[in-house]
Image: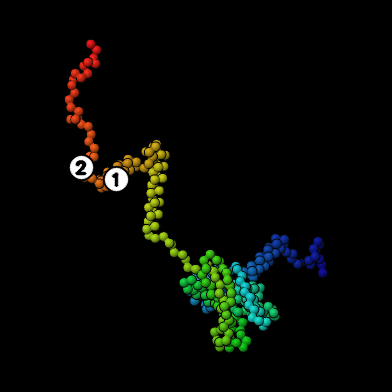
């Protein structure tokens, strides 16, 4: 087989040019990056049923729970020497994203290390009341001899507690003595379950605030106009100073008229000295003071 000089490729073979080789590597790296991004992207809650059947209320509630999605909750339960479990819970996220089992609430036996999925986020139900949100994960691992072997289900009651993002995650009970509809009941407190606070301002307060704001704008704006545009000084800088001055005089006269305790034509409490009391003065009373 003949070889071309300076090349390891047989004669007639095509070498990949450097630009093409670089482009191929870039495409491979981009494909790997996209694959890793898809793997690292966490799965979220999927409401039971078709996507088209999800109501606006369910979407709104799931969005309302988003602030809790980055948090992890754990609670330990010990019942004698036979039961020693720890429960791991996440809101609309997988407890262990590497396992790809959709487990949103998982039970781990601390003695044997066995892990049991109580509920999965791909079978979620959510609804609410005035100050609570109920989150249900269905489709957990099947019971053995309990509950007719049906799949486990986790019910998480999130109650309103203002000022707290999330706290007090605990297990209330496990209902497994029935033939069907068995469940694990958990509860926790969070401010996301609280209703929006209504404004405590009355209509009168709102009107008063509006009135005071308009007065402030009138005074400040008028003062700046009089000073900067008109060039007024002193008291003349007050907007419509003459009008307010006349209004003050009219108010004073009105108060004097309304609040006067005596009739307007009542004689004064004192008598002044009138000209009629002085009498006529002699024109010659000062004559002796004149020089002779």
In this rendering, the answer to whether 185 lies above or below 220 is below
Q: Is residue 76 visible?
A: yes
Dot 2 or dot 1: first in sequence order is 1
* Residue 147 horizontal side relative to residue 290, left or right: right
Quarter occupied by the N terminus: bottom right
Query: How far apart are the two marked residues, 2 and 1, measured between alpha carbons?
Result: 23 Å
* Residue 279 horizontal side relative to residue 153, left or right: left
Residue located at (39% from left, 37% from top): 234
> SS at mark 1?
helix
According to the picture, the residue beneath numbered tag 1 turns out to be 251
In this rendering, the answer to whether 231 lies above or below 140 is above
- Residue 245 position within the rendered picture, expressed as x and y whole percent measured from the top left: 32, 41
Q: Which mark is residue 266?
A: 2
Residue located at (41% from left, 39% from top): 227
- Residue 109 position within the rendered picture, expressed as x and y whole percent measured from the top left: 67, 79
- Residue that lies at the very extreme toward the top in this rendered image: 292
Looking at the image, do the residues carrying marks 2 and 1 touch, with CB atoms under 8 Å apart? no
Of 26 and 47, the residue lying toward us: 47
- Residue 64 position within the rendered picture, expressed as x and y whole percent measured from the top left: 52, 68
In this rendering, the answer to whether 17 lies above or below 112 is above
Using the rendered view, name the quadrant where residue 113 is placed.
bottom right
* For discs 2 and 1, the disc positioned in front in the rendered view: 2
Quarter occupied by the C terminus: top left
């Amino acid at each position: 087989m003949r070889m071309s000089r300076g090349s390891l490729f047989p004669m007639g073979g095509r070498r990949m040019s450097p630009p093409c080789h670089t482009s191929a590597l870039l495409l491979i790296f981009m494909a790997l990056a996209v694959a890793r991004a898809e793997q690292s992207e966490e799965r979220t809650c999927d409401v039971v049923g078709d996507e088209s059947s999800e109501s606006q209320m369910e979407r709104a509630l799931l969005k309302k729970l988003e602030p809790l999605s980055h948090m992890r909750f754990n609670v330990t339960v010990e019942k004698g020497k036979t039961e020693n479990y720890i429960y791991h819970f996440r809101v609309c996220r997988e407890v262990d994203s590497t396992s790809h089992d959709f487990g949103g609430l998982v039970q781990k036996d601390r003695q044997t290390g066995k892990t049991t999925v109580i509920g999965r986020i791909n079978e979620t139900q959510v609804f609410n009341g005035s100050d609570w949100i109920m989150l249900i994960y269905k489709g957990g691992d099947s019971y053995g001899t309990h509950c007719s072997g049906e799949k486990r289900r986790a019910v998480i009651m999130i109650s309103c507690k203002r000022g707290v993002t999330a706290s007090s995650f605990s297990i209330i009970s496990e209902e497994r003595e029935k033939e069907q509809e068995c469940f694990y009941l958990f509860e926790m407190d969070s401010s996301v379950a609280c209703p929006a606070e209504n404004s405590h301002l009355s209509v009168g307060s709102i009107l008063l605030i509006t009135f005071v704001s308009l007065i402030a704008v009138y005074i400040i704006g008028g003062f700046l106009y009089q000073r900067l545009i008109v060039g007024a000084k002193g008291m003349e800088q007050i907007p419509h100073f003459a009008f307010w001055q006349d209004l003050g005089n009219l108010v004073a006269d009105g108060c004097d008229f309304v609040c006067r305790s005596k009739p307007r034509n009542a004689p004064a409490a004192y008598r002044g000295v009138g000209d009629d009391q002085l009498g006529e003065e002699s024109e010659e009373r000062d004559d002796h003071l004149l020089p002779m």
